[in-house]
Amino acid sequence: MQTEAQLKPETIERLEEQSGFLLRTYELELGKDPASRATESARSNLIAMRHTINQIYGESAALDVTDALGFATVSGDKEL
């Protein structure tokens, strides 16, 4: 059974910075045109980052980064 990784503060800070950049990019594109390819791409990048954090560092780390950025998953089967 795999255990959750213990993250250093520097790692958490870097993940929050990267995720924050992706979130700001998504919000910017969403404000311009919610149906554009750029918006969908930015959303995909944000989702991919969260899944990557989950795969590498574990679910709790992914949730910690998500919580630190102050956004929640979208209702239904889509998540941010």
Image (cartoon, rainbow, N blue to C red):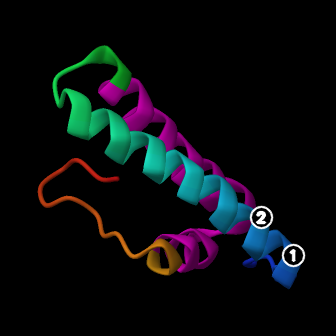
Give yes or no for residue 9 being in the magenta stretch. Answer: no
Taking the image as shown, residue 72 lies to the left or right of residue 44, namely left
Q: Which residue type carries mark 1? A: Glu
Q: Position of residue 22 (x, y in %)?
A: 53, 46
Residue tagged 1: 10
- Where residue 39 sits in the image (x, y, percent)? 32, 29
Residue on which disc 2 sits: 14
The quadrant where residue 43 appears:
top left
Q: Quadrant of residue 59?
A: bottom right
Return the residue found at the far left: 76
Region rendered in magenta: 39-66
Residue 61 vs 24, above or below: the answer is: below
Name the residue type under label 2: Arg
> Does the image show residue 2?
no
Which element type, helix, strand or loop, lies under badge 1?
helix
**Residue 4 x, y percent position in the rendering:** 72, 78
Q: In the figure, is residue 6 to the left or right of 42?
A: right
Task: Please say whether residue 41 is one of the residues in the magenta stretch.
Answer: yes
Toward the top, the furthest residue is 37
Rendered view: 5 above or below 22: below
Asked whether the residues under the numbered discs 1 and 2 touch, taking CB atoms below 8 Å apart as contact, a structural biologist would say yes
Q: Residue at x 83, y 83 (%)?
A: 9
